[in-house]
Amino acid sequence: MTVALLIGCLTVIFTMGIEVAAMVFMLRHLLKVVSRQAGKSYGWGFDTYIISVVMAVLFVGHLFQVAIWAGLFLSIGEFSDFQTAFYHSMVNYAALGYGDIVMTEPWRLLGALESTVGVLMFGLTAGIMIAVMTPLFARHTQIKKYIQHDQGQSVDKNQNG
């Protein structure tokens, strides 16, 4: 169990490090793109681009982590082919726990560690999506208020004129 815990923890650190690095790279890229759009009005196409890039990078990051875990399972001899290892890894990572394929007793802890990583990464994904979408929506609200104010409409229903 100690060996499985050590190998699992090292894999957790490695996979999380890759995912975090990918997120930082993606967010820096998107900040540059958004800063180039500063002061400009943009519509659904720009929002769709930003959200799509974020989702794609995060999804590929999840698949990459699953593949790393599958490679680990292959390297320790738990599975004879990558397809089965990848399937088992995906079930663990998504915390589905089908149980149709079970690892041998000395290595079972790896499945639980991978599930923990998956839960953490899905939570991080949700947080990143909210962090990206909030400023996009806030900008549209600010533009709408500016346009209403510019047209002489009251922004606050409680205000007069």
Image (cartoon, grey):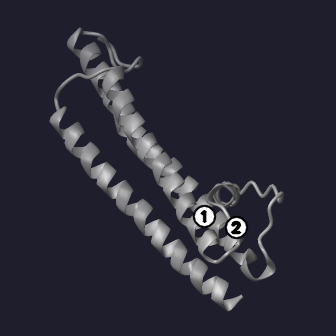
Q: Is residue 91 above or below residue 15?
A: above
Identity of the residue drawn at 70% across and 55% down: 91
Q: Residue at the spot x=66%, y=64% of the render?
A: 115
Name the residue beneath numbered marker 1.
70
> Relative to 95, is 46 on the left or the right?
left
Residue 160, given in percent of the width and then of the height, sits at 33, 14
Q: Are marks 1 and 2 in contact (CB under 8 Å)?
A: yes
Quarter location, residue 90:
bottom right
The local secondary structure at tag 1 comes to: helix
Q: Earlier in the sequence, mark 1 or mark 2?
A: 1
Quadrant of res 118: bottom right
Task: Identify which amino acid the numbered label 2 is placed on.
Answer: Phe
In the picture, the quarter occupied by the C terminus is top left
- Identify the residue at image location x=19%, y=32%: 37
Q: Which mark is residue 104?
A: none
Side of 25 where 75 appears, left or right: right
Which residue is at the front of the view, 148 or 15?
15
- Relative to 129, is 74 above or below? below
Q: Compared with residue 84, is residue 10 higher up or lower down, i.e. above or below? A: below
Q: x, y (%) of residue 135?
A: 35, 38
Q: Which of the image's four quarters has the N terminus?
A: bottom right
The amino acid type found where label 1 is placed reads: Ala
Tell me, for residue 79, which label it has, or none: 2
